[in-house]
Image (cartoon, rainbow, N blue to C red):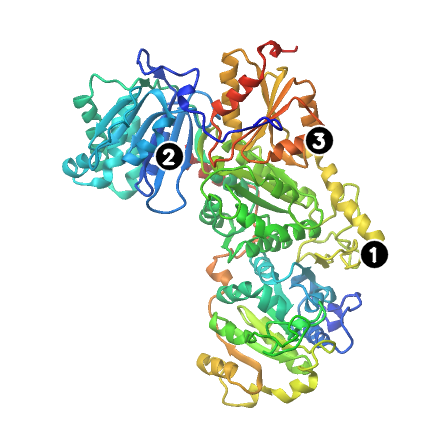
Amino acid sequence: MATVLTPKDFATATPSWWCAGCGDYGVLSALKSALADLGLQPKDVAFVSGIGCSGKISGYVHSYAFHGVHGRALPVATAVKLANHELTVIAAGGDGDGYAIGAGHFVHALRRNADITYIVMDNQTYGLTKGQSSPTSATGYVAGTSPNGSAEAPINGLALGLAAGGTFLARGFSAQPKALVELLKAAVRHRGFSVVEVMSPCVTFNKINTYAWFKENVHDIAADAEYDPSDRTHAFDVLTRTGRIPLGIVYREERPTFEDLSHIPEQPLVRQPLTGLRDRLEALQRAYR
Amino acid sequence: MRGHGAFRLEHRIPAVHAYGFARQGVRNSVVLNEIEIMFGGQAGDGSLTTGDLIAGVFKRMGLEVYTYKDFPSRIRGGHTNYVIRACEQPDYGKADAVDGLVAFDVEAVEAHIEEMRPGGFVVFDNTSEALPDGVRRADIFWYEIPLARIAKVDLGLELVRNTISLGVLAKLIGMDPKIVRDDVAAVYGRKGQKVVDINLRAIEAGERYIEEHFAGQPAGYGLVAKADRDRLIMMGNDAIAYGALVAGCRFMAGYPITPATDVLEWMAKYAPAFGGVVVQAEDELSAINMTIGASFAGVRSMTATSGPGQALMTEAIGLAAVLEIPIVVVECARAGPSTGMPTKTEQSNLNHLIFSGHGEIPRVVLAPGTVEESFYLTVDAFNLAERFQVPVFILSEQALCQSKATLPPLDIESVRVDRGRLIADGELTFGEYKRFAFTDDGVSPRAIPGVPGGMHLAAGSEHNDFGVITESAKNRARMMDKRMHKLHAMRDELPKARVLGDPHASVAIIGYGSNRGPIAEAQDCLSRDDIVTRFLQLRTLWPFPDDEVRDFVASADHVFVVENNYTGQLERLIRYTTGPLPSLHSIRKYDGRPFLPIEIAEPIRRLVPTASLEVRR
């Protein structure tokens, strides 16, 4: 099909559940633009999301969308890709979905390097359950479940990603739509597992990490002409240095994907023949005679 | 003990009480084509290979074979035993007693001497330790042979001790010497001619030792070769995996767990040549979600696990049901709860498979009773899953899934792959597709990614027929009706129960799974005493076969439910269906070991008054 699609072609008629001003709108809008810019067709996009405010996003992207159980978007997305590697597979979830209940899968998805894109919509709180502390909340963050302030150190998702073998690690900000579109396009084009963490403020429950706060506290690493995203040591330094939150493609490398190393057939699994195999299947019985 | 009609087998009934075979220590005849051999020693000593060799020889001599692994949950050390049973009847399980014990240490003798049949024999390796006084039962024949020393001194390789024991056995019970040698050559062939040669010499050394030292002491057992019909010898787990591949399964994700790992390993070895992919997931949560993901994308998918993994998968199985995505989940049950006894058998996960999960979902539970059924029911599982877009469980148990048995060749020609209402390219017009359309049988045409016009949201949240999330009361009730209605719509397509024995007998037995063998053998034992029985072997456990069970018990004077668990999980399902049933008795065992036929036959014999044994025609 040669039709040129626009972001609208990736919209559904479903009204949004998000609060007015929620950072997740910026992610949704950037994603639809990126998919259109990449020339993709909705039928060829599988979009998997978890649970939480962020998880609602799959209902708003016209595609083969999957809204599963809490924390398990990555196993689903990985298997969809293995089953049909001709699809563009994108997973999305929040900081709770990805870094708390789903943290185990995050680490193993990084090791596997399947050619899928994972968007972590980070609002540093649990929005859908009305404002508890999350794995990315700052130590001392006061919330319903931490009235005296969170007693835990926040997870640094991208640094964790680097340590676990990530091949594409980027961070965006939902209030910087143009840059976010480009990050998402680069992530989808990356051959391997790409992580895009998006700072996506919760206007209802997180009164600390607000749009204004982010504007003060982020910096674009591309502003540094010398920055080399293939330099792993430098990337780790940038990600773990205290101070401003780095935005942009922090790290990128090429290595064989999970599909390559799993020796998936050229013809996707979903189109493998299930008939006409009698002789070959019979042959397997001979070992038991 | 009889408080609520349950026979609890807290202690194994000593084999000396076994009726029908007892020969009271005096050898006045030779038992033909009926023998159970046990290899006992330390885990990792190689008796598995030798045991499999013997099983192969028995099969080639035309006998029916069943093997049972009683291994500790560790890699090396700890007492272990491997049982090989041969007889003329197909589908029997473990026998009432062990006829021949091959013991590599004193512990093996002490652990199993009570399980031995009077008139049986022990081959004991006395190289490093002598048998203590008082162990030698007088009604057993003893062959104390320095197996390890012969291996080391005469053959220069201690490793072949097991093969010498095979030569000893071959001579004692009359295994065909040519078949023994052919099989040894075939099994060790891949390790090179040198290895084959030393093992052949080991066989000879074993045979010679018996000729030279025990010429006047026959073992009392004999084998008469029958025509070896075309048959297979296969492990239950291999039959499941093979069935999955034949049924078109091209994706499997699993997490290693005893006793289910064989399924994952088999698929990892063979599926890629058929365009399949197998993933070792990071945990069972991932494994089940991957299985669902691959099926969402249109590939026949399965996972295999055991109790602890099954518990972790529970949430996502609800997801599969509500997304109406077909999946097959193999449960190889072991003794629980918690870690329990990972290498021991139990039927205590039935409630879990049927009732687990929050909310209410349609699901299917199938239970093969033999290795052969493990293949065919797996094929059925995939077809039912796609036909009705539901999760289907295959429930096996350690005593079946890790046991080998002889079976007729598996009929691949008869296998039909029914993918149900799967939408092909070009069938849909844009904007109209209702993934969860309301239909007569509750099954909606399913579009998979890549099909134009089939885009939809598959949401674990309640949704309308388009897939859009809604909490509307009217829609909720309709969607529940739609999904749950499948349980009724599928009734005629579910595997039927089998009836074994005399269908008119007044004594009825109900059971499933690995108990099929011991129950069938108990029936044969009872019939020798003119107690005629019929046995309903359930093969679909959910949706529960109410009609079959009601019809079966209606005309019975006594109903015995046989199961390997404490609480009588199957019995309760039956009572729920039949209502109060004073004639219903429960025979339960929960020590992690499979039933012996006598443990089923004896309670029946004790409870059934001889007067009521007439057969109604």
- B601, A214: nearer the viewer: B601
- Residue B128 found in image quarter: top left
Q: State the CA–CA distance, disc 2 to disc 3.
A: 40 Å
Q: Respond whether the residues carrying marks 2 and 3 are from the same subunit.
A: yes
- Earlier along the polypeptide chain: callout 1 or callout 2? 2
Mark 1 highlights which residue?
A: B472
Q: Dot 1: what SS?
A: loop
Q: Chain of mark 3?
A: B
Q: Which residue is mark 3?
A: B577
Q: Do we see residue B250 in this rendering? A: no
Taking the spot 49% from the left edge, 17% from the top edge, the residue there is B525
What is the three-letter code of the residue carrying label 1? Ser
Q: Is residue B277 left or right of residue B183?
A: right
Q: Residue A288, percent across and down?
A: 42, 35
Q: Are marks 3 and 1 on the same chain?
A: yes
* Residue occupied by mark 2: B82
* Location of residue A284 with respect to B523 vertically, above or below: below
